[in-house]
Image (tube, rainbow, N blue to C red):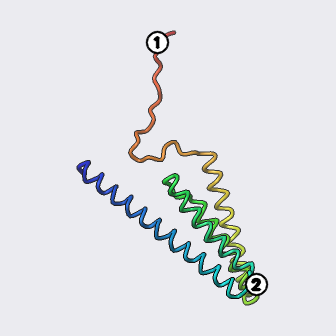
Amino acid sequence: MPMSSRRAGLSSLKLLENLALVIITVATTIAIFQEVMVMIEQREVRLADLLLLFIYLEVLAMVGIYIKSGQLPVRMPIYIAIVALARYLILDMKEMDFWQIMGVTLGVLLLAAAVLVIRYGHVRFPYESYGADEPAASPSKSTKPPGS
């Protein structure tokens, strides 16, 4: 593939990524505004409302991290899922039977374990390079003459 078509393809992909990030940011901001308006209309702030706002803030934080680093943080969606399951449990606990509660709780526990495993993997086995186009680091050769 010629380099110019590859560069054009990568530029197009980057443009689509940025467009998607703008759409996600605008949609999340609108959702925050709508939720605040509901709280104002009801003149009540409930725990479920706060958890929903926290989920929105996590989405915005994830977008910010992606913009700064160019990498999607794998743990952020898991954190969002944990908060979403906690919110679901808080809102619908009265209508849920024992096994449904246990299923949601087990889901939270598995997600938390996944975060620990991912975190351990990142600390124990850090990435050497994120760029696919970067050549792998070659071991440095000694400049000493043999036998010295």
In the rendered structure, which amino acid carries the disc numbered 2? Phe
Residue found at x 38% / y 45%: 133
Q: Which residue is mark 1?
A: 146
Location of residue 6 with respect to 15 vertically, above or below: above
Kind of residue sitting beneath label 1? Pro
Residue 24, percent from left and from top: 50, 70
Using residue 65 as the reference point, say whether residue 3 is left or right of it.
Answer: left
Q: Residue at x 47, y 29 (%)?
A: 139
Q: Residue 137, how many percent across, how many down?
A: 45, 35
Left or right of residue 128, residue 50 in this image: right
Instruction: Say which of 26 and 120 sits in front.
Output: 26
- Percent across and percent down for residue 53 are 65, 73
- Above or below residue 111? Residue 97 is below
Residue marked by disc 2: 98
Q: Residue furthest left?
A: 2
Image quadrant of residue 104? Answer: bottom right
Q: Position of residue 117 (x, y in %)?
A: 65, 56
Observer-nearest of 109 and 63: 63
